[in-house]
Amino acid sequence: MTQDTPPACDGYVARILSTIEELNRLKDVDAILDKTLAAARALADAEAGSIFLVEDGRLAFRYVHNDVLFGGDGVSPAVYKSFTLPIDETSIVGYAAQTGKPLVIDDAYALPDSLPYRFNKSFDESTGFRTRSILTLPLKTFDARLVGVMQIINARGPDGASGPFDQEHRTYIPLFAQNAAVAIERGRMTRELILRMMRMAELRDPTETGAHVQRVGAFAAEIYHRWAMDRGLPPEEIRRFKDLLRIAAMLHDVGKVGVSDTIIKKPSRLSDDEFMLMKRHTVYGARLFADCHSDLDELCRDIALRHHEQWAGGGYPGRLDVLSDEHGPGLPMKGHEIPLAARITSLADVYDALASPRSYKEPWPEERVLEFIREKSGVQFDPEVVEAFFKVHDVLLAIRERFAETG
Ligand code: C2E
Ligand code: SIN
Ligand code: SIN
Ligand code: FE
Ligand code: FE
């Protein structure tokens, strides 16, 4: 069999096509936003960028990259910052959303006073970053629905100095943006679907709120990111696993739908018999994914079944046949026998449970929670996962603010 060499086609088009393919493989909306920004920035070698999504008729800040302020490896707490802007002419992103047209600015500090919008200097002033050129693109699907707005900031020329966006950037980045809009919309629908599924569990257990599951998903994703970077895993592998992990970790307790109300809502300690029935939530969760075979299904099953195992052994359910009705405990499971995704989600879940109110306990102060986690490193938790946890603790606090219980 012979393989034709593709014609040496325009570098931009080839890159855009392969990026669209990668985007279409991602499931989680945050992974899609991250990839979208990375790809759009790469087309112009731009220093920074951000994405706002339309939510309740406003533009909600949802993702940011900035090589100058927080480049290098890892994720900045700024990614989880939370604020919204109106869709109107007063801001640059609002203007692009309202008109539905791309906006090209060569120098943000030299805008004529006659324009309806103003450049908001507060970000530059508070960070020391210097915005120059801005390419602002409405993210619209093929049937012209506005999903959000992307800003790409400071195109770098061949000499590495930032300058205006050139004709090629202005042609190709919008082309890519339209495909990105479709992927983002799909990612948001996936997220909605999961939150709806969790609302069924929430009817049972009022602590399993959308905010709690989004926190646990985000904690797990960021702890994994640090763990994987520290081991030099390839960026594309990290992106893919992180994508699936965030979704699967959100579903860790979906099996609570199978446990009775009287147990879950009990406002005091559980008896041994009650706790034994509560432990079945791991098996019920795993059964939901029992005969599905995608990578995501397998990860969901691993996490649902194993998120209460303990590093040194002694967790539950242990080794047992998920489809049988034996109530365990199964033979103990420990260390690396527990899937990595479950070791990470276990810490993410307990961190959130300890720091939050429960029907049976008050929230613990942060210092006490951290002390507990340190103490249980190597006992309840994988020490390497604990290490990654402490390295991203500032990001985890930003996640707590972003997905606060009332927000
Ligand atoms: P959850 O409330 O989401 O807690 C998840 C995990 O966080 C717990 O798993 C445990 O490992 C940790 N955790 C939560 N609160 C505390 C605490 O005060 N001290 C310590 N050391 N760890 C804590 P676990 O124990 O396997 O419990 C699983 C689920 O069972 C809990 O999920 C909760 O829904 C229920 N549950 C556990 N104990 C009680 C209880 O005494 N009363 C009631 N009503 N429910 C309980
Ligand atoms: C912002 O980051 O505050 C939005 C910048 C703008 O479009 O004015
Ligand atoms: C590990 O167990 O530490 C890595 C292997 C894995 O579970 O992916
Ligand atoms: Fe659980
Ligand atoms: Fe939980």
Image (cartoon, rainbow, N blue to C red):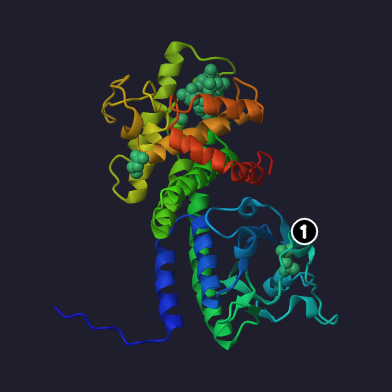
Q: Is residue 357 left or right of residue 143?
A: right
**Residue at point 39% right, 62% down?**
25
Residue 246 at least partly seen: no
Q: Quadrant of residue 123?
A: bottom right
Q: Nearer the viewer, residue 334 or 293?
A: 334
Which residue is denoted by mark 1 in the rendering?
126
Few, some or many residues within 10 Å of mark 1 (<14, 14–19, 20+) = few
Percent x, y for residue 107? 73, 79
Answer above or below: position of 366 versus 224. Answer: above
Q: Nearer the viewer, residue 152 or 17?
A: 152
Residue type for callout 1: Ser
**Residue at point 32% right, 26% down?**
333
Ligand 2 quadrant in view: bottom right
Percent x, y for residue 341? 40, 41
**Residue at point 67% right, 27% down?**
365
Q: Is residue 230 left or right of residue 161?
A: left
- Residue closest to the far right: 113
Percent x, y for residue 240? 41, 55
Image quadrant for the N terminus?
bottom left
Answer above or below: position of 384 versus 225. Answer: above
Image quadrant for the C terminus?
top right
Q: Quadrant of residue 370?
A: top right
Q: Nearer the viewer, residue 262 or 190?
A: 190
Q: Is residue 217 left or right of residue 364?
A: left
Judged from the image, the secondary structure of the residue bearing numbered disc 1 is helix
Q: Is residue 141 left or right of residue 382?
A: right
